[in-house]
Image (cartoon, rainbow, N blue to C red):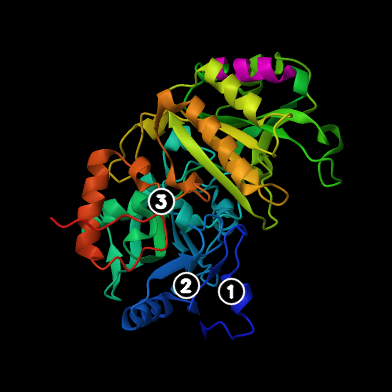
Amino acid sequence: MTITPDHARYDAERSGFQTAFDHRPAVIVAATGAEDVRAAVGLARARGLPVAVQATGHGRAGAADDFVLINTRGMTGVRVDAEHRTAWVEAGAQWHHVITAAAPHGLAPLSGSAPEVGAVGYTLGGGIGLLARQYGYAADHVRAIEVVTSDARLRHVTEDSDPDLFWALRGGRDNFGVVTGIEIDLVPVATFYGGGLHFDVERVPDVVSGYLAWSTTVPEEVTSSIGLIVMPDLPMVPEPLRGRYVAHIRIAYTGDDGDRLVAPLRALGPRLIDRLGEMPFTEAGSIYNDPTRPHGYVGDNAMLTELDESALREVLDLTGPQSPVMSIVDIRHLGGALSREPEAPNAVGHRAAQYILRVLSPLDNADASTVHSLHTKAFDAVRAWTLGRSPNFVYGKGNSVSESYEPQDLKRLEHLKALYDRENLFRVNQNIQPRAN
């Protein structure tokens, strides 16, 4: 269906999870299949308009007007091949669709903290999931990609059929076409040891220090993080956490001795909430319990060679209970399989990073300039250890591709952009500029 600004469904179709950045496309194509996407790209070419694609709208690139928006939220099909441990995932499917389809076979995808995030966009940007240290990036486990390129041609791309485009799409996101579906690996995980520990404000310094020390000792089967947040005093927040500044350690472990593994964390002090134990992968979203209500927010990240504790204390001083704006600090432990090149190399960058630091602030009742200033100071504090950024965790920042890839990979991406999208049709995004050979 083609929708213009005078259509009754226009506002509903252009909206997404991220509400901070308004965009008013000239035309919206509500796609239900690959042929709709192909026709939409052809329409954009004929009108001389750029193309953007949106499934769930968690990571919209920012405000824009006068473009063709391809909305893939109607393309939610998932087909599981249990024998080969793979799934074919359409462009608008969210991770909960894939999780639900895989679970009866004792399998799981390499999904992230939020089951409501679009599986394809997440994967094309890299994908740091709940089992990432054991299995690597989600992008490392893509077998095939169906994509409509700038010539309005639908291509089935694999490492054998088109190794350059296959390399670029896995990490280069939506710069080379509109992906209509991907074939991904599933892993044999039905249950795992996971959940979280919440500590109160007076324990935060020791808990952060203790968590960082613990993270250097664990096997690759452990993927973990720690979050620091002033919890709102609202009824939907569990009563022990309301209005408190808390440290939240999150764990996903596929081994069989979980209680022994986390004993040093429990020894850090009394917990407000202790919810660690065996759980089915279908409940993996409860670990982070990310919000599902659309809202406006900005955020950024730094991929770090190490986490200097004095620099981190500066970040926490800026973002803690005395901060002028609400900020969520999220520190995820990387390394393990994330550090290794996959069998089929891709454009995902900064594999030497051992941690990723994220700072995110809602904009509901905050001044944008104050938020920007605070975030700038926070990331300046860790600049000496920063390799770059993950494109999946950039919300509201200007074009940051120069920091998202290794220099030699960015140069290759720019050359491939010139080959597959010389006119830069796909530019309403974190845009890779075409570079002539």
Residue 329 as seen in the image, left or right of residue 266: left
CB-based contact (under 8 Å), mark 1 and mark 2:
yes
Under circle 2, the secondary element is strand
Q: Residue furthest left?
A: 437
User: Along the horizontal axis of the image, is 280 left or right of 392?
Assistant: right
Disc 3 crowd, CA 10 A, few/some/many (<14, 14-19, 20+)? some
User: How far from the left and from the top, in percent, is residue 336?
Assistant: 42, 28
Picture residue at 25% right of the left edge, 57% below the top: 165
User: What mark, if any, has residue 117 been given in the picture?
Assistant: none
Residue under pointer 3? 399
The amino acid on which the numbered mark 2 sits, given as a three-letter code, is: Leu
Any part of residue 163 in sight? no
Residue 423, percent from left and from top: 26, 68
Q: How much space separates mark 3 and mark 1, taking CA atoms?
A: 25 Å
The verdict on residue 411 being magenta is no
Residue that mark 1 sits on: 13
SS at mark 3 in the image? loop
Frontmost residue, 112 versus 42: 42
For the C terminus, the quadrant is: bottom left
On the image, the x and y values in percent for residue 105 come to 54, 52
Magenta span of residues: 203-213
Q: Which residue is depicted at the point 69% across and 39% down?
A: 325
- What whole-number distance in Å separates the C-alpha atoms at marks 2 and 3? 19 Å
Q: Position of residue 186 (x, y in %)?
A: 46, 49
Which is the main secondary structure of the residues drawn in magenta? helix
Residue 406 seen by the camera: yes
The kind of residue tagged 1 is: Glu
| Mark 2 Cα-neighbour bin, 10 Å: few <14, some 14–19, many ≥20 | many
Would you say 158 lies left or right of 19 here?
left
